[in-house]
Amino acid sequence: MFTKETYMARREQLKKSVGSGILVLPGNDECGMNYEDNTYDFRQDSTFLYFFGLPYAGLTAIIDIDRNEEIIFGDEATIDDIVWTGTQPSLRERCEKAGITKILPSKKTAGFMHISYAEDRKFHCLPPYRAEHRLKLLEWLGCVPEPSVEFIRAVVSQRNRKSADEIAEIEKACNITSDMHIAAMRELQIGMKECEIAGLMSDIACSAGGRPAFPIIATVNGQTLHNHYHGNTVKDGDMLLIDAGAETETGYCGDMSSTIPAGKKFTPAQKEIYDIQVASHLAAVEALRPGVPFEAVYNLSAKVICEGMKSLGLMRGDMEEAVEAGAHALFFPCGLGHMMGLDVHDMENLGEVWVGYDGKPKSTQFGRKSLRLARPLEPGFVLTVEPGIYFIPELIDLWESEKRFSGFINYEKVKNFRSFGGLRNEEDYLITETGARRLGKKIPLTTAEVEELR
Ligand code: GLY
Ligand code: MN
């Protein structure tokens, strides 16, 4: 946890931004995997963590702005809890660390809500993403209220700009994340199973006191963007695409990707495509600075990919026009990056339109619609840069059958790459006053750097 003054100052700012009403923040509960007592690893809600720092299950926070009151609803450990889970600080002691002095038993939550509701007080809620949140809201308010835009906007504007304390935590997560990737690059051998590399990386995250920030991707089928299957054996000539990150004990995340040849070197065809992807990556990084819309950085990285495809004869025509039309999405059907912080996709539960678009509408164009961040960059933003090149057989076949963008795409040539797979690299950046700074130790990026480590 940070100091209690940090959480108190964050709540003061939140109260000022929203102005009036009651802010409702349900924390997360334990969740049974296959029976109630066999739980998934507990993870507190990130907005709850940001404003209260308390990483414990079974809490609800209320901030009554009009009465200037902050309450945590929760229960002290029973003797049974202590028998099974050990001696622990009291809830009061825990709450003091967050600067909270008013604590009420959880059975009083519904009563508090009902009285406030009868008084016609205004409730502000965030979009629920867990069934337990919906059930609680139903019990307390008789409905799942429409999310409060004032509340969402206030939270986003605070959490989007990272403080020095937060940046230090994110940098810790990024350093562990780098270690995970470097170990995978060193250890991968032909004949290993994907799960061996996934297990190795998971170990590093856990041994550092945290855990993986999201389900690890370690796949020979990198053309599938979020491939969580780890059952394949890595063969000579394969590339292993890894997308993995660590979360620290305090909940801050890292998120990096790398693509490793199974043997000591990339094949000539792999190198050709990989080099295009690195050029796109470097162009994007070079363009990061305050004031630049991230959508412009995405357009630039897509254009570099298209120019590379054109140089190989897979595309033709004016590549700026191709990107505007959306033809790049045959090879790059996803976004370029996303905000990162207490969530690996920071605040995605609050809505990408608020986090990444400042309330402006998103494009519906295939590929571009998956861009999670488009707004002008500001100092303090932490984001990922992760262009990729993917040859997805079903997508190639579909677009060819529709003759989609046939003015820009040479399907006869593209078909030669149907079984190529996919590759991506990803780094994490902090936007500074004048540009951007990479967070975490550098992981090998160019083919020469990767091959040197193999
Ligand atoms: N690391 C997974 C993603 O960014 O989508
Ligand atoms: Mn990412």
Image (spheres, rainbow, N blue to C red):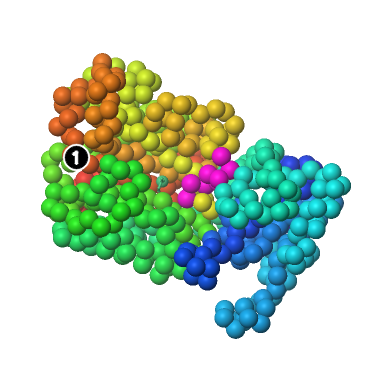
**Quadrant that contains the C terminus:** bottom left
Does the magenta stretch mainly form a helix, a strand or a loop? loop
Residue occupied by mark 1: 420
Indicate whether 201 appears above or below 262.
Answer: below
Task: Say if the magenta span includes residue 350.
Answer: yes
- Res. 12 visible in picture: no
Which residues fall within the magenta stretch?
A: 344-351
What residue is drawn where x is 66% and y is 41%?
147
Extreme residue in the right direction: 119
Residue 287 falls left or right of residue 258: right
Quadrant of residue 332 within the rendered picture? top left
Sort mark 1 into few (<14), some (14-19) or many (20+) by Cα contacts within 10 Å: many
Task: State the image coordinates of residue 384 (x, y, percent, origin top left).
Answer: 43, 44
Helix, strand, or loop for circle 1? loop
Task: State the image coordinates of residue 164 (x, y, percent, origin top left).
Answer: 57, 53
- Res. 262 visible in picture: yes
Callout 1: CB less than 8 Å from ligand 1 = no
What residue is drawn where x is 46% and y is 26%?
364
Task: State the image coordinates of residue 218 (x, y, percent, origin top left).
Answer: 30, 54
Residue nearest the observer in this picture, 318 or 116: 116
What residue is drawn where x is 32% and y is 20%?
322
Task: State the image coordinates of residue 271 (x, y, percent, origin top left).
Answer: 18, 41
Q: Residue type at mark 1?
A: Phe
**Quadrant that contains the N terminus:** bottom right
Indicate whether 300 appears above or below 65.
Answer: above
Residue 257 falls left or right of residue 270: right
